[in-house]
Image (cartoon, rainbow, N blue to C red):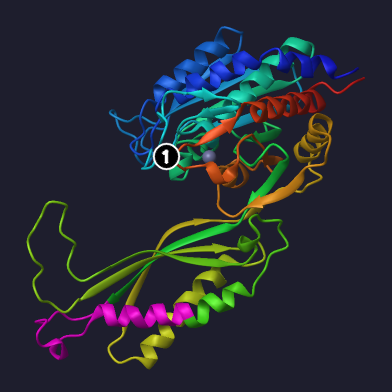
């Protein structure tokens, strides 16, 4: 059977796609604090329910950030015709803060030429809209398919996904009994297929000192000077060592194919005054200094070794430096994941990209992390990729936009993936 009818069914929905993406952008689902989550779930759920989908709303009760004021709502919709595989499209519905530097209204959903502007247009309401249109076009042209299509709009991806995909996966919404293939329409460009991501370890390191009068620092012991020694070791030993380690994963940009370490923050001595507080600091030797490390590691590295490399550096300083004392606290960790490029959803998406765009896609991996981690580790679903419209570097930027043609092309790809996996020609 030809697939031309599926492509045409997406093409005729062009205005519908634009309108849907605009409506989604116009619901400011800011995270933090977690605004309008129920509203965006209702909007999508109402649309799908009217077309015969089964719709569930799931609040992540007790998840980080969940409160009666800012409830963490998720929406999961399923359309099933009978036994068979299930392809699930998962999009996060939250967006990051607006920030400075906008020349457009971030929540107007303004279309100018081929661009739809707004906070979240690229990351990832454009991809969410594309997946809805793809599913609708597929259902209209292949009503006899066997299996199920699912669409979810989930909370809090931007803050770790604990009130979203992690919560749902822990409760069985993502597991092999229910779902077979997962496609996450994150903005990675319409000609690239993202197979996974690097690992993450966040830790807080604190150096301890002894407080004294700042006019007689020799009577105290400065935690800031101890931290300077830590930073020196990181700068001159650890960072160069990390730069020599490279991964076989196709991470983009290429600089992220090495291990990396960022000092996310540093705080030492007295607490900084609040804005508007004009009081002067008192002269004290700092008895505490803290940094937060953001270490991104490779699939070839083991997390225990990643951690002990840092504690070894600190232990060496304890021996070498009089008075040096430290403590370390784990904040957050994510293991690297990677789907095989021959896995069904990856291979089907590659075929569809070639059909729609006339060229083979690039297979890439993300330098950061996204909800695939929870789908893989909690949901035990290994057939998972990220694929969606939008240019990754525009995410979280002022004047964020998504290309209308990119949304349409990626919707065509997603519709063909549905046909490939759920309605193969007989
Ligand atoms: Zn995103």
Residue 1 located left or right of residue 24: right
User: Is residue 234 located in the magenta-colored stretch of the structure?
Assistant: yes
Specify the quadrant of the image occupied by residue 367: bottom right
Q: Is residue 156 above or below residue 25?
A: below
The quarter of the image holding the N terminus is top right
What is the secondary structure assignment of the residue under circle 1? Answer: loop
Rendering coords of residue 264 (x, y %): 40, 62
Residue 292 located within the stretch drawn in magenta: no
Disc 1: residue Cβ within 8 A of ligand 1's nearest atom? no
Whether residue 153 is situated above or below residue 347 in the rendered picture: above
Q: Can you identify the residue that label 1 sits on?
A: 96
Residue extent of the magenta highlight? 208-235
Instruction: Tell me if residue 388 comes above or below residue 16 in the rendering.
Output: below
Q: Is residue 345 above or below residue 367?
A: above
Viewport quadrant of the C terminus: top right
| Side of 381 relative to 77 (left or right) | right
Residue 298 seen from this side: no
Can residue 420 be seen here? yes
Query: How would you rate the neighbour count of disc 1 (Cα within 10 Å): few for under 14, some for 14-19, many for 20 or more?
Result: many
| Residue 142, picture quadrant | top right
Task: Report the residue at 37% width, 25% height from top.
Answer: 36
In percent of width and height, residue 41 lies at 46, 21
Q: Residue at x 53, y 42 (%)?
A: 394
């Amino acid at each position: 059977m030809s697939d031309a009818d599926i492509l045409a069914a997406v093409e005729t929905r062009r205005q519908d796609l634009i309108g849907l993406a605009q409506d989604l952008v116009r619901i400011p689902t800011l995270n933090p604090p977690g605004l309008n989550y129920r509203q965006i779930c209702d909007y999508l759920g109402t649309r799908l329910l009217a077309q015969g989908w089964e719709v569930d709303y799931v609040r992540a009760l007790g998840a980080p950030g969940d409160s009666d004021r800012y409830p963490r709502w998720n929406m999961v919709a399923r359309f099933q015709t009978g036994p068979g595989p299930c392809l699930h499209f998962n999009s996060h519905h939250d967006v990051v803060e607006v920030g400075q530097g906008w020349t457009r209204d971030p929540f107007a959903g303004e279309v100018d030429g081929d661009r739809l502007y707004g906070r979240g247009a690229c990351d990832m309401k454009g991809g969410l809209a594309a997946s809805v249109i793809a599913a609708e076009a597929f259902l209209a042209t292949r009503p006899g398919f066997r299996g199920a299509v699912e669409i979810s709009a989930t909370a809090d991806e931007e803050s770790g996904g604990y009130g979203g995909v992690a919560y749902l996966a822990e409760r069985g919404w993502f597991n092999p009994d229910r779902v077979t293939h997962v496609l996450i329409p994150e903005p990675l460009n319409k000609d690239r297929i993202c197979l996974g991501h690097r690992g993450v370890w966040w830790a807080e390191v604190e150096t301890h000192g002894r407080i004294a009068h700042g006019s007689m620092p020799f009577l105290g012991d400065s935690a800031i000077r101890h931290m300077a020694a830590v930073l020196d070791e990181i700068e001159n030993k650890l960072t160069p060592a990390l730069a020599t380690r490279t991964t076989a994963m196709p991470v983009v940009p290429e600089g992220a194919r090495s291990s990396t370490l960022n000092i996310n923050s540093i705080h030492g001595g007295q607490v900084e005054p609040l804005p508007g507080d004009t009081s002067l600091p008192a002269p004290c030797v700092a008895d505490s200094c803290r940094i937060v490390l953001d270490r991104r590691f490779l699939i070839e590295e083991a997390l225990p070794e990643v951690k002990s490399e840092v504690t070894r550096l600190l232990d060496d300083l304890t021996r070498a430096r009089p008075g040096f004392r430290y403590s370390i606290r784990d904040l957050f960790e994510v293991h690297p994941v990677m789907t095989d490029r021959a896995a069904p959803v990856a291979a089907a998406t590659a075929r569809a990209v070639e059909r729609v765009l006339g060229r083979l896609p690039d297979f890439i991996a993300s330098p950061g992390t996204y909800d695939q981690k929870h789908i893989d580790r909690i949901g035990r679903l290994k057939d998972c990729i990220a694929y969606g419209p939008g240019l990754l570097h525009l995410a979280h930027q002022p004047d964020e936009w998504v290309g209308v043609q990119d949304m349409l092309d990626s919707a065509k790809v997603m519709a063909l993936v549905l046909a490939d996996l759920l309605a193969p020609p007989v």
